[in-house]
Amino acid sequence: MSNTGKPCPFCTLPAERIINSNAFGVTIRDGFPVSLGHTLVIPKRHVGSWFEISQEEQQALMELLTKAQKVLEQEFNPDGYNIGINDGPAAGQTVPHLHMHLIPRYKGDQEDARGGVRWIIPEKAKYWK
């Protein structure tokens, strides 16, 4: 159950959304993708933070992340990736169930992609100025 009293969307995933899985996690395509192939890696256990899962769970999620990258490479041939976790509301986490974003990047999808994830705080992104 989420903090809003609504069922957790990652605890109630329909089977047809699941691309891959292992003992500890699942992989799905993001429902609101920021790029073609945007993928999520989600633990099966309802837990909010990367820092609350065991090393075994972390390893299993990293294995799913690597497999997801290989699928994206074959399916879409992106030019790069952003990998991120919004861990806690102050970091922008909107679903209180841990999930990792694997965001394929394509040449030209941004005029200047330098800084990548640093753009979460725009005034600090351009450290090379």
Image: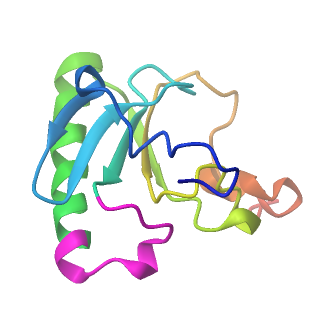
State which quarter of the image contains the C terminus: bottom right
Task: Name the image quarter holding residue 45.
Answer: bottom left
Left/right placement of residue 48 relative to residue 66 reads right
> Is residue 55 shown in magenta?
yes
| Residue at x-position 59% and y-position 54% | 2
> Is residue 44 shown in magenta?
no
Q: Nearer the viewer, residue 23 or 128?
A: 23
Picture colour scheme: rainbow
* 34 relative to 7, above or below: above
Residue lying furthest left: 23
How far across and down, in percent of the image, does residue 22 sit?
A: 11, 51
Residue lying furthest front: 5
Give the magenta part as a residue range.
45-57
* 54 relative to 79, above or below: below
Q: Nearer the viewer, residue 86 or 21?
A: 21
| Residue at x-position 33% and y-position 48% | 41
How far across and down, in percent of the image, does residue 12 sit?
A: 38, 38
Residue lying furthest right: 123
Left/right placement of residue 49 relative to residue 15 reads right
How far across and down, in percent of the image, does residue 70 sit?
A: 16, 36
Q: Nearer the viewer, residue 127 or 64?
A: 64
Left/right placement of residue 18 relative to residue 2 reads left
| Residue at x-position 22% and y-position 39% | 68
How far across and down, in percent of the image, does residue 98 sit?
A: 46, 59
Count of numbered marks: 0
